[in-house]
Amino acid sequence: AGLNGVAAPKLFGWSFGDSGMPGMDYRMARVNDNAGVALMPGETGHPNFYFDTDGVQSERFFLDEPGRYAALETDAAALRTFDFGILHGLLQIPEYTRAVLSAQLPHHSAQEVEQLVELRLRRQDRLHADVPLRVTAVVDESVLFRVVGGSEVMAAQMRHLLALMDLPHLVVRVLPFTAGHRRSHMGHFMLMEIPDDLGSDLVYIEGHAGAT
């Protein structure tokens, strides 16, 4: 707690130029266009596996390409994220995820939503791998008060979040209401630390215009 919108980027070692964007590279995810699955290459020491997104339709603004972000995240050795709407997917319980996706994707079938819930759960395996993904998550205080899926779901989600914070490679920090409105509130974003043999570090940004 006590982390303001100026300190958060500094915590991550970011600097913002005139464009307001961190000085990092941008890459598109490696997606298997033929099979409808996102390839999870396992090049960072975790097992090879696939995320099946076959049949899940894209939706402008919310789901440009199912599995795109997951494919990028798999290459990362460390992830630093800021969220001010909902908790990051790696921190979510299935019920929370299901409520989020059902609200964001009202035109998708229950089966498609369940596929995406499973995708999110598979991503969380990285937190418990022999060589785990290192995560630093900064969340706006409003995220902890926003009721997603009902009070029982939120209670379970908060218990899960507390349990995750016992992991030595996962840190959760809160940007408090008293920090006011900061530049970081322009949109949520992820900084991925990519091993040198796989490429350069990158920033992934999601917004109403899609993902970059």
Image (cartoon, rainbow, N blue to C red):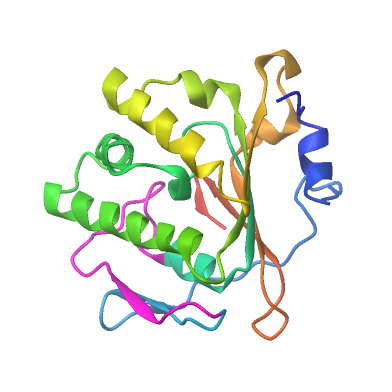
Image quarter hosting the C terminus: bottom right
Identity of the residue furthest to the top in this view? 178
**In front of the other: 190 or 134:** 134
In x, y percent, where is residue 183? 74, 32
The answer to whether 7 is drawn above or below residue 20 in the figure is above
The range drawn in magenta is 45-67
Q: Is residue 189 left or right of residue 53?
A: right
Image quarter hosting the N terminus: top right
Q: Is residue 51 magenta?
A: yes
Q: Is residue 168 magenta?
A: no
In x, y percent, where is residue 184? 70, 35
**In front of the other: 191 or 66:** 191
Does the magenta stretch mainly form a helix, a strand or a loop?
loop
**In front of the other: 85 or 173:** 173
Identify the residue at image location x=61%, y=47%: 189
The answer to whether 163 is drawn above or below residue 36 in the figure is above
